[in-house]
Amino acid sequence: MPINTLFTMKTLHLLIKHFLRTTPVFGVIVSVIFLLVTCQNPFSTREPELPSGEQTLWIQPIAPEIVLINLQSAIQERNIENYIRCFGLVEDVRKNFTFVPEISVANNFQGIFLNWGIIEERNYMNHLFGLTPADSVSNLRLTDITEIQFGDSVSTTKEYDLFIAHTNPSAPVIVNGRMVLNLRKGSDALWFISSWSDFKTGNSPVWTLLKAEFK
């Protein structure tokens, strides 16, 4: 099944689930009808794909789960702008982002993560994507561990496996570990990542190391 279809069907499922949780019954019916009418038919002929780097699988993050779908698609497409949008659509929101590195990597790269924010996120990802061949495959797999919602905030813990075929010989192409993401709903009712903590789950390199190597 084409990847665009996979994202469409997964997103439709998440949106319906979101409306069932937050919308009265009449609103659910209207919302589902709207989604079915406006969503691309998964069995229809696909339109030609845009060249690599011009694709955009961005979905308005009206539910916290969609932020993670956008994160995965941004990495798969190597789309820096969509990656940064996962931390908020406006600069006033993004500037409050915080990252807590995995402690052993932080100790090996003294000082790098003391003031890590959205500028550093953009810089390292620009460098990483810049050293990743256009015809290579990038993939982020996330496995649910726990999720706690309180009001307009969600704390979600995921185990991650990230593969990026970059050409930097000093950095790993596969990293895995555990991330704790705090997501918030903004005044525009859209969700974003407000903080990110990284943890080891074994002896494999973790995401923090990629951030340090491509800073």
Image (spheres, rainbow, N blue to C red):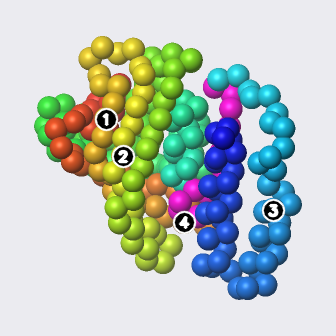
Quarter of the view holding residue 188: bottom right
Which residue is disc 3 drawn over? Answer: 36
Q: Position of residue 147 (x, y in %)?
A: 39, 68
Sort mark 4 into few (<14), some (14-19) or many (20+) by Cα contacts within 10 Å.
many
Residue at 68%, 60% in the rendered image: 12
Q: Position of residue 19 (x, y in %)?
A: 66, 74
Q: Which one is earlier in the sequence, the residue at label 4 or at label 1? A: 1
Q: For residue 3: magenta?
A: no
Q: Position of residue 159 (x, y in %)?
A: 33, 51
Residue at 14%, 32% in the rendered image: 108
* Camera-side mark, 4 or 1: 1
Which residue is disc 2 drawn over? Answer: 160
Mark number, residue 66:
none
Residue type of the residue flagged with mark 4: Lys
- Is residue 124 or residue 41 the one in the foreground? 41
Report whether 196 appears left or right of 59: left
How far apart in space, not on screen, are marks 4 and 1 (Cα)?
29 Å
Which residue is disc 1 drawn over? Answer: 175
Q: Which residues are magenta?
A: 53-66
Residue at 64%, 63% in the rendered image: 13
Q: Which one is earlier in the sequence, the residue at label 4 or at label 2? A: 2
Quarter of the view holding residue 82: top right
Q: Quadrant of the N terminus?
A: top right
On the question of residue 74 being in view, the answer is: yes
Which residue is disc 4 drawn over? Answer: 185
Residue type of the residue flagged with mark 3: Leu
